[in-house]
Image: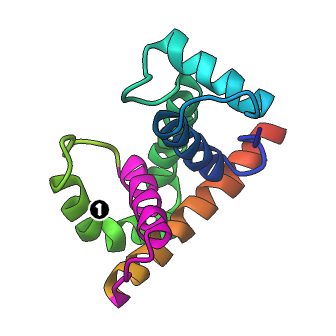
């Protein structure tokens, strides 16, 4: 399984992808031990039909906490979030959870773009630009997360 210490944002996106995969395809004898373990966790946590694993939610909370700290301590980070804010607000308004955190919205944006690409749907230039900004924010957070984990 991917490690959140390598890249916490990719770890969260990976867990979301595996949750969707396990919801879409019934388990079979050829499934990897990792998929069996995640499937069992989803059953134990009661998220077989919807929701996210505690592993993903806990990692997301850690990223949100780091984000909150950086908003006060890092002017460049704060500026990047401010530039991204209108796009995040539009995305949030289209969901059933308009009060989700900016970081969850960034992850949701990247996840939805990944799904669009899998369906071979066109990504507009504007969406690609927002994707790049969200990716940069999440990369920065993930790098700082690694630094904080090794201290």
Name the residue carrying label 1.
88
Instruction: Please name the residue shown 84% across and 40% down the image.
Output: 150
The relative height of residue 103 versus residue 40 in the rendered view (above or below) is below
Q: Quadrant of the C terminus?
A: top right
Taking depth in this image into account, of 139 and 77 the one nearest to the observer is 139
* Residue sticking out furthest to the front: 29
Give the camera-side residue of 115 and 79: 115
**Magenta span contains residue 105:** yes
Residue 109 located left or right of residue 100: right
Q: x, y percentage for residue 51?
A: 39, 29
Tell me the residue at 53%/20% (across/down).
42
Left or right: 39, with 111 as reference point: right
Q: Is residue 79 above or below residue 55?
A: below
Task: Give whichever of 111, 20 is nearer the camera.
Answer: 20
**Quadrant housing the N terminus:** top right
Residue 135, position in %: x, y? 53, 68
Q: Which residues are magenta?
A: 102-125
Residue 150 in sight: yes
Q: Coloured how?
A: rainbow
In the rendered image, the vertical position of residue 106 relative to residue 57, given as above or below: below
The overriding secondary structure of the stretch rendered in magenta is: helix
**What residue occupies the far bottom of the structure in this picture?**
125
In this image, 5 relative to 122: left or right? right
| Spot occupied by residue 40 in the image (x, y as percentages of width and height) | 62, 16
Specify whether 34 is left or right of 16. right
Residue sitting at x 60%, y 17%: 41
**Quarter of the rendering containing residue 59:** top right
């Amino acid at each position: 399984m991917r490690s959140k210490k390598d890249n916490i944002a990719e770890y969260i996106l990976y867990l979301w992808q595996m949750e969707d995969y396990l919801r879409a395809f019934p388990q079979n004898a050829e499934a990897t031990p990792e998929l069996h373990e995640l499937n069992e966790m989803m059953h134990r946590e009661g998220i077989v039909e919807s929701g996210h694993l505690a592993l993903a939610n806990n990692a997301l909370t850690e990223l949100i906490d780091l984000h909150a700290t950086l908003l006060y301590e890092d002017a460049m980070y704060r500026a990047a979030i401010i530039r991204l804010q209108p796009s995040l607000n539009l995305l949030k308004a289209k969901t059933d959870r308009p009060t989700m955190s900016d970081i969850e919205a960034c992850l949701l944006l990247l996840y939805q773009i990944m799904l669009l690409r899998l369906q071979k749907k066109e990504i507009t230039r504007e969406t690609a630009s927002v994707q790049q900004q969200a990716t940069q924010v999440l990369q920065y957070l993930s790098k700082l997360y690694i630094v904080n984990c090794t201290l």
